[in-house]
Image (cartoon, helix red, strand yellow):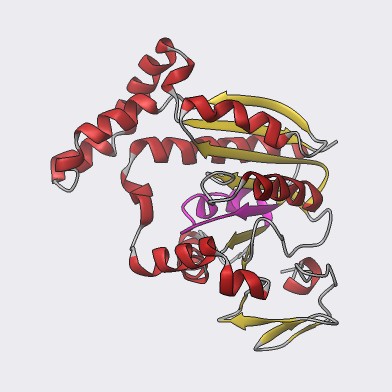
Amino acid sequence: MTHSFTQLLICPQTGEKVFQLTDKEVVTTHCSYPLVDNVPVMLPQELLNQQEATIFFENFYQNTAEPWDYSERAAELLRHDYVVDQVARMSSLLGRKAIILDIGCSLGHITARLHPYAELLVGMDISLTAIKKARQRCLQSLPDQHNPYLFVVGSATDLPFKDHCFDIVVASDGLHGWHLSDHLQRKAVKEIYRVMKPHAYAVFTDYLHPRLHPKIEPTLRQAPWQIERIELLYDRLWYRFESLLKAFRHTTWAKKVLANKPFALFLKKIARNMGKTQSKHIAAIVSKR
C-alpha cells in the first residue's frame, strides 16, 4: 500500500504530525497514542476517561453482537444502498478511485461495500471493539489480495487526520446518532470540512423525527462547502410497520418480512406520496469547492 498511518495521522490535540510509529504507539512531538492490534487509538485522554458517548459506545459494542440489526432490517439495507450509490457517483465524478473516510463506521456494513471505489479506505469509530469487528468484516469481503483498508479509533469532533486528506467522507447516521450536542455537531462539521480535499464530496445521513429535519441545513452551513442537495429517504412507514411486528421480530417469518427490500421499497413509494412527514432518515450531499 502506498499510504500509511504516518502519512495521514496527526495529534488530535495539537495538530502535530506523527514522526514515529512503533509496535505499541503512535508518537508526535508532545503526545503519544496506543497502537492496539495495529489500530491507532487516537483519542484525547479526556475523551477516553470522561466522555459519556465514548464509554457508552464501547460498552454497547462489547455487549451486543450486531447493534441495530443492520443486516436484518430492510430500511437500513436500503439506507446502506443509498450511501454506497452516492459514493459510486462521487467516485465517477472524480474520475478515479478515491481516498475515502468512513466516520462512525460501526461494524463496517457500509465500509465493506466501498472498496471498489477506493484507492485507500479509512474506517474510523470511537469504539475499539467496533473497529476490530469492522476490520474483520471488511477483510473477509475483499475479492482479491488488494487491501485498501486502514482502521483508526478517533472522534468526529477531533479528527486525527491532516488537512485536505480525503476525496470522499461518509458520515452515516452521524451528527445526531453520535450523541453530540449542537456545539459538538458544529465542531464535527468543521472538522470534516478541514480533512476534505478541494473538490471533495461528503454524504451525511441521520435518523430523526421529521420535525427535527430543518436542523440539518443550519448545522451543515457551519462549513463553507456547497450543499448540493438535501433529500428524504421516506422510510417512516417502514419503521411504523416494524414496530407492529416488535413482538414477533425474532420469529423466522417476521425476520423474512423485515429483511424484504422489495416490500420496503413498496412502503417507501407509499410514504413518498404521503409527503415529507413520512421520512425518518434525511440525507445531505455536499461538495468542497
Q: Which residues are magenta?
A: 100-120
Q: Is residue 260 above or below residue 186?
A: above
* Residue farthest toward the bottom in the current orientation of the protein: 23
Q: Residue at x 72, y 50 (%)?
A: 187
Q: Residue at x 52, y 71 (%)?
A: 128
Q: Residue at x 75, y 45 (%)?
A: 96
Q: Position of residue 49 (x, y in %)?
A: 57, 74
Total labels: the figure holds 0
As drawn, is 53 to the left or to the right of 160? left
Q: Residue at x 61, y 39 (%)?
A: 204
As drawn, is 288 to the left or to the right of 177? right
Q: Is residue 101 magenta?
A: yes
Res 217 quadrant in image: top right
Q: Is residue 117 magenta?
A: yes
Q: Position of residue 89 (x, y in %)?
A: 65, 34
Q: Is residue 244 above or below residue 50?
A: above
Q: Position of residue 277 (x, y in %)?
A: 45, 19
Q: Position of residue 64 (x, y in %)?
A: 34, 63
Res 219 quadrant in image: top right
As drawn, is 151 to the left or to the right of 221? left
Front in this rendered view, residue 282 or 167: 282
Front in this rendered view, residue 97 or 283: 283
In which quadrant will I find the N terminus? bottom right
In which quadrant will I find the C terminus? top right
